[in-house]
Every structure is written in structure tokens, then in C-alpha cells.
Image (tube, rainbow, N blue to C red):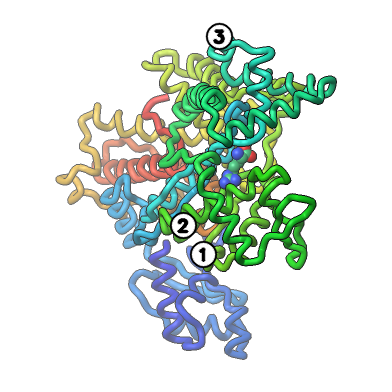
Amino acid sequence: MQHYKELIAGQVSSLIKEISVEEVISLLEYPAKPEMGDISLPCFSLSKILRQAPGQIAERLLEQIKDDAIARMEALSGYLNFFINKEQFATTIIHEIINEADRYGSRNIGQGRTVVIDYSSPNIAKPFHVGHLRSTVIGNALYQIYSFLGYNCVGVNHLGDWGTQFGKLIVAYQRWGSAEQIEQDAIDEMFRLYVKFHQEVETYPELEDEARAWFVKMEQGDQEALHLWTWFIEISMREFEKIYNLLGVSFDSYAGESFYNDKMEPVIQQLKDQNLLEEDQGAWLVRLDSFDMAPALMLKKDGSSLYHTRDVTAAIYRQETYHFDKAIYVTDYSQNLHFQQWFKVIELMGYPWAKDLVHVPFGRVSLEGSGFSTRKGNVIKLEDLLQQAILKTKEIIEAKNPQLDNKDEIAQQVGVGAVIFNDLSGNRIKDIVFSWEEVLSFEGETGPYVQYTHARACSVLRKATELGYTAPADGELAIELDPTLLNNSVEFSTLKMLSVFPERIEQALVKLEPSMISRYLVDLAQAFNRFYHDSPILIEDVSLRTARLALVQCVQITLQNGLRLIGLQSPEKI
Ligand code: ARG
């Protein structure tokens, strides 16, 4: 479809010199109703430029535009509606998808430019919660989308592995903990100790000083302190890795907050030299009053660094190391101010790349009514949630398809896919309420629905092979393939849906909105299911059968590519 937009825009722009090809492209629409054409040009904004009524402009263009790719045009109420040449369109799109296969939808618009994506970033010794899951899922999808469009991506897990909380944990561990317990219950136990510390400190405030002393020791490189700290990291990472394995997510760098310990001093010095730091009751901060923001605290009274200090230092390091064209940070919107503040600090330091820093905020996930809602001191374990999803999926699969081989593997792909898809179901900024019924529905707008539709396409193709019909992708058959036979309205709308995939990927990238792909996949799945119910596929008529099988194959390819972009597997059987 993009191709048709470019073609129309090219003609319009050469007929109306005042408007560029890009401007026309941005005006073009896909009408909601097929009788309004396949592409439509609203002439209202042109009317202002040309001082002519929209209807007149439409009429004039209708007479002047000519191209084989366009079957006919209609000027209606200020719109010029284009009806594309269906035969030519069907042939082009079917061949394009079959030839490009797992690259269908990809482009090289990134041309070696680098994007650093900071996502997931859980905190050591604390639970990996649903907010971290959403960051992981959105960040990973952005990573896949950028890569597919030719960008060089660096995925960074900015682990929360430094800070005063480790002093508290050491104190709590030495008083009330045991190595066995930590080895056994891992983060649960470390978090229990951390919570206990906060309870006890109410009665014994001196614990606070003790904790601070331990953290100072850590900062000074004390062996014992660092030994414990390393161990806490190991235990936590083992648990995080289980989650990443289930999700199928990996990172290029695990440089967490502690990585910047020896890199902050020069940054503080630079801030001082640039007269950006101001002392305030022993602490050091950057005033942001003239930007209507609270100051960014860079050093505490005791000289220790903060979240801000590490982010500023990390950004400078990432620019020097990766020479990024864009650096993206995926967290929930409660951190909006934090990012605005330190982006401003980078700008004030005079770095021209401050404009390339992008915060991608997302809404909160609430678990009300899911059986997982948070009670005091009882945080939901994400791994439990994923395991539950797998278990529930297995029950559903067992009821639907008892003969299926490797049920466990499929249940994992679908169960985890359901949870991932749920996080991408609406615009990222929207808060979401977790509901098992919605997440796991095989109907509705869910991951399993899309995966199941993909498996259905695979099953048609499999049956065709079993019956001895050659697959459309086979070289020999390509000659016999006649896509122009795909001319009923359901086939045509499925083809149109297939053809907008590359555009949707680009929009998802521009808006940093992976949900555009998940919604596209639901639309495509619905179009395919209408086709599947309407049009018999494994019929006697060889030519029509081959053409329809080719369409099924194109849907299979596109669903698979789309699912991959948002981090879902596409099993062939469910
Ligand atoms: N560890 C932080 C948290 O759990 C998220 C870090 C996000 N990345 C960053 N560079 N600040 O809230």
C-alpha cells in the first residue's frame, strides 16, 4: 500500500507544485468503507493553499492523474477516492511476501545508525515486579522493531545493583539471616530481610547508622562487604535469568548502576567547573527552577551519589562507547520527572546529543482481582505469574487438543505469549488491569488468538502438503501461481491488510508504540479468519487452490514476522 501512496503522491505533487510528495503522503488515508476506495485524498487542506474549493481540486486531479496501478477514481464531497488495480496489486503483494519471507516488512531505514535501549533494569535483591515485566516486554519489542528496520541496537539492562539498600541488607542478613535460607529462597528471603530491617529500625534507630557504615565500606572496597554484595547479585541474577529465559529476552550489556562507580567523579568535577553545581546544606545539586522543575540532586551530604548521578554518567559513557543516534529509556511514567531532570542536566552541560535522549513511559499494571494483588509484605512473584499462565494454558490446550505432542513446550509459548501480548494490548501509556479471562482467551484480542490463527494457517498448509499439493513457495509452482484469482472482497481485504504491514512497523517505530503491531496482528488474524470461513481452500480447481494457498502462506509469514517483532513465538500446532 505504501507503494500506491508514493505513486499517487508523486503524481499529485507534480501536478500541484506547492505541495511536496511527503506532504501528500501524510494526507492520504485508508477509507473505512471499501466503497469509498482503497486510498483517499482529502482535498481540504489543499483548498487553502490553492484558494479553490476542495471539490474542484478533486475533479481536476481526477482528470489529470493517470497510472496503470489505478483502476478508477471518484471525486466525492471534497475527497478524491482511488480504486487500485486489484489484479496487479494481488500479484505484486503475493510475490513480494513469498520472496521476502521472514524479511517481509523489514527495511534498511536505520542504515547503520545506533540505538541504545535501556529496559527491564530490575533491582538486585528485590522482586522483579509487573512494572519490570512491562519494561522488558516493551523494550524488547522496540529492540526487535529497530533491528528489523536496519538499526544497530544495543540492549542495556541497567541493573539496580548499588546503593544504601545493600548496607541495610548486610545488617539484616548478619542479624537475622542465614546462607542456607538465602540459597533456598533467593530474592524472597533477601526481600524479607530488607522488610524486617525497616520494621526493626523503628525500635532500634542505630541500625540505620550501622547500615550506612556498611555501605561506606562497600564504597571503599572492603573485601567482606563486596563479597556479600557479589553473592546477592549472583543469587538475584539466577532468578532474573529464569524469567528472561521464559520470556526469550536477552541483553547486550548488563552494566548496572555499580558499573559507574569509578566514572562519576570526573562528571561531578565537570559540573562544578561549569558552575552548574550548587551546595545546599552540604549536598550538591543542579538548580532547574527556570525550567519549572525541582533541583536534580547529584551528591548527598555524605558524598554518596544518587540515581541521577548514575544516569548522567551512564549516558555520557554510552555516548562515548556506542556513539548512539538515540538512547531510549523504558520505565513507567512515575519516573517522568526523573528523566526530564537529568536530560536537562545533560543539555546544560552542553552536550548536543541531549536531544537524542528519549524517555518511553508506560502505564501501571494493576493486578486487582487476578488473585495476585499485592498485600502488605507480599509482592507478586513474576515467575509465579508466568508459571500460572503456562499451567492454565496447558489445561485449555488439553481440553481443546488432547492429541497434541509436546504440550509443555506449546503451553509455555502460548502462556508466556499471552502475558506478553497483554502488556502490549493498548497504548503503552494506558494503565492496564490484569485479567486471566482476557489474557488467555483464544478468541478476543489476545496473544493466543493470534498464535492460534497462525497455527490454523500452518495446518491448512500442512494438509495441502499431505494431499500432495505443491506449496506455492516452491519455485516451479510460482509460474502456475495466478494471484489475480484472489478477487473476491474478503480475499481483497485480506491482501490489503497484508500490504500495510511494513507501514505499521514504521509507525510503531516513529511512535515508539509496539502495541501498533499487536493491534495489527489482531486485525490481520480477523481478516484471515473471515477468509478461512468464507472461502474453501483445499478444492479441486488447481489454479484457485494454488492462489488461495499462496494467500494462506502470506498470512502465515506475516503473522510469524509480526509475532517475532513483539517477542512472541509462533508454534505451528496448538
Ligand atoms: N532500576 C530502576 C527501577 O527499578 C529502573 C532503571 C531504569 N533505567 C535507568 N537508566 N534509570 O525503577
Residue 431, position in %: x, y?
69, 42
Residue positioned 84% across, 20% down in the render:
203
Question: What secondary structure is found at the residue carrying circle 3?
Answer: helix
Q: Nearer the viewer, residue 8 or 117?
A: 117
Q: Determine contact: label 1, label 3, CB under 8 Å.
A: no
Q: Is residue 180 left or right of residue 11?
A: right
Question: What secondary structure is found at the residue carrying circle 1?
Answer: helix
- Label located before the other in sequence (2 or 3): 3
Q: Residue furthest top?
A: 180
Residue 310, position in %: x, y?
58, 47
Number of residues whose C-alpha sits closer than 10 Å to that of mark 3, classed few (under 14), some (14–19) or many (20 or more) = few
Could you give the CA–CA distance between mark 2 and mark 1, rounded to whole angstroms? 8 Å
Could you give the CA–CA distance between mark 2 and mark 3, rounded to whole angstroms? 42 Å
Task: Work out whether residue 261 can be spotted.
Answer: yes
Residue positioned 48% across, 53% down in the render:
317
Ligand 1 found in image quarter: top right
Q: Nearer the viewer, residue 198 or 217?
A: 217
Task: Work out whether residue 534 can be spotted.
Answer: no
Could you give the CA–CA distance between mark 1 and mark 3, rounded to whole angstroms? 48 Å
Q: Is residue 464 left or right of residue 493?
A: left
For residue 457, above or below residue 547:
above
In which quadrant of the rendered view does residue 53 lie? bottom right
Q: Determine contact: label 2, label 3, CB under 8 Å.
A: no
Q: Amino acid at mark 2?
A: Gln
Q: Amino acid at mark 3?
A: Glu
**Image quadrant containing the N terminus:** bottom left
Q: Which residue is mark 3?
A: 180
Q: Which residue is mark 1?
A: 353
Q: Which residue is mark 2?
A: 319
